[in-house]
Image (cartoon, helix red, strand yellow):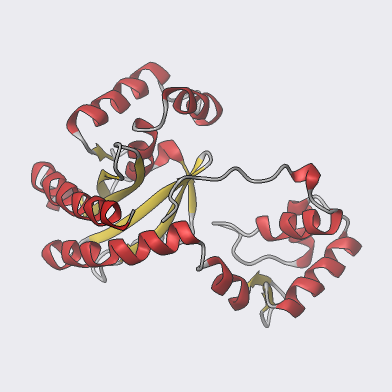
Amino acid sequence: MVIAERPAPPRAALPRSVDRALSIIGTFRQGRARQTLSEISRNADLPLATTYRMVNSLAEWGALERDDHGRYHVGLRLWEVGSLAPRSMAMQRIARPFMHDLYEITHYSIHLAIREGNETVFVERFQSPSQVLTRPRVGGRHDMHTTAVGRVLLAYAPLDERDRMLDEQLPPTVDAHAFKRELAEVRIRGYAISGRDLNTEYMAVAAPVTVPGGQVVAALSLIMRYEDADERNAAHLVRVAAGGISRSLSAKR
């Protein structure tokens, strides 16, 4: 099973029509799940006439669908194709039993995420009906520093990549030196915690998922209300579940 990331081909090497189609599909992300034709044109930085032609072609194939209000969203066929991505599919299949067990023990929401470039991508979750969480959704992307799973993935990233991501993403309002110390602490204790700076109601505890050699390929998190939080116990449970996923991944290699 291949876990390592593969760099995307340079955009300049792609045919113009493919480049435009990918630009249009790339406009659909969290906060822009449904868009009008004009919004797609603006967000893809393409002329409206070009966008119209490309969107119609994508809709005919099933990559996009149009609702009753004239807005477009990702189509079922594109979702079906995307769900076959080897890295996320294999990770989901192996992780689900451990995520289910963790959910049954805690009845809290469970999230699994991987790193894609400079972003955290959520590939699976178990949602507690008692927790009103609008995000993250499966397939949702977030900056690395904004979630507990992202902080785990940052903490265990190669030093040069970590510094580059922090230089590109960390807002000026965040003390870079203090944040780097926090990431060092994550490596020492083996888990990350999200603070009230990320969410005033819910706290997340996340632990790394590894493969032989110690490479961190994913992060698992447990979400709970602050009034219910028991950091030490939650960290133990998440680390046990993440360890189970890691052992199963190792057995498949």
> Taking 178 as reference, is 16 above or below it?
below
Number of callouts in the render?
A: 0
Q: Quadrant of the N terminus?
A: bottom left
Residue at point 34%, 31% (across, down): 155
Residue at point 50%, 28% (across, down): 171
Is 183 left or right of 160, judged from the image as shown? left
Residue at point 34%, 33% (across, down): 156
Question: Residue 170: percent from the left, percent from the top?
Answer: 48, 28
| Quarter of the figure with residue 154 | top left
> Taking 114 as reference, is 110 above or below it?
below
Is 165 left or right of 158, judged from the image as shown? right
* Along the line of sight, the residue nearer the viewer: 153 or 34: 153
For residue 188, say whether it is visible. yes
> Taking 68 as reference, is 209 above or below it?
above
Is 97 left or right of 93, judged from the image as shown? left
Question: Residue 2: percent from the left, percent from the top?
Answer: 45, 52
Residue at point 41%, 40% (across, down): 146
For residue 27, say whether it is visible. no
> Taking 6 as reference, is 46 above or below it?
below
Give the residue furthest to the bottom: 68
* Along the line of sight, the residue nearer the viewer: 117 or 198: 117
* Along the line of sight, the residue nearer the viewer: 71 or 150: 150
Question: Residue 17: percent from the left, percent from the top?
Answer: 84, 59
* Along the line of sight, the residue nearer the viewer: 70 or 115: 115
Give the residue furthest to the top: 177
